[in-house]
Image (tube, helix red, strand yellow):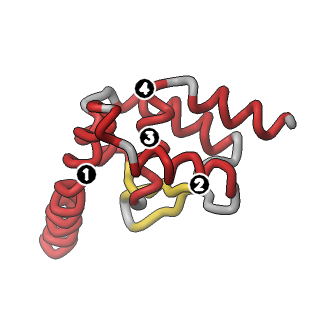
Amino acid sequence: MRALINIFKVLADETRLRILVLLYQKKLCVCQLQGVMKESQPKISKHLAKLRNMGFVKDERDEKFIFYYLNKENKMLVSILENITRNTEDYPTLKEDLLRISYTDDYIKEKMKELKDLKKDD
């Protein structure tokens, strides 16, 4: 029962809910979440830390970036997020977030290219 209560506590916060909906779609780094959500880096990082500590998200390093992704072992959370993403017409903020997420890959590709160019110059 405690696990179920924790899920709903996490989802009761708008920022954490938005992060989880986005991570349900794909792995993202803090800078991508910032761009999509139009929130500050410290705010997003604070919420990601809480989500990671509770076991809802995991992370992995890829060169200079740390990417976060949904812990899909939590079947209840995955099921809830699946239902939310199917009904975004009722939630304009989530709908806008999901539209903006398509631009995140281009941003990371550009940053990775910049990093590689810097390494070549060294």
Which of the 4 image quarters holds residue 34? top left
Camera-side mark, 3 or 2: 2
Camera-side mark, 2 or 4: 2
Q: Residue furthest right?
A: 1
Which residue does the numbered mark 1 point to in the structure image? Answer: 101
Q: Which mark is residue 78?
A: 2
Which residue does the numbered mark 4 point to in the structure image? Answer: 43
Element assignment for label 4: helix
* Place of residue 86 in the rendered image (x, y in percent of width and height, measured from the top left): 40, 51
Element assignment for label 1: helix
Q: Nearer the N terminus, badge 2 or badge 4?
A: 4
Camera-side mark, 4 or 3: 3
Q: Amino acid at mark 3?
A: Ile
Looking at the picture, tell me which residue is in the foreground, 117 or 122: 117
Q: Are marks 1 and 2 in contact (CB under 8 Å)?
A: no
Q: Quadrant of the N terminus?
A: top right
Left or right side of 65 for 24: right
Element assignment for label 2: helix
Looking at the picture, tell me which residue is in the foreground, 76 or 87: 87
Q: Amino acid at mark 2?
A: Val
> Measured along the vertical axis of the image, is residue 101 above or below residue 60?
above
Which residue does the numbered mark 3 point to in the structure image? Answer: 19
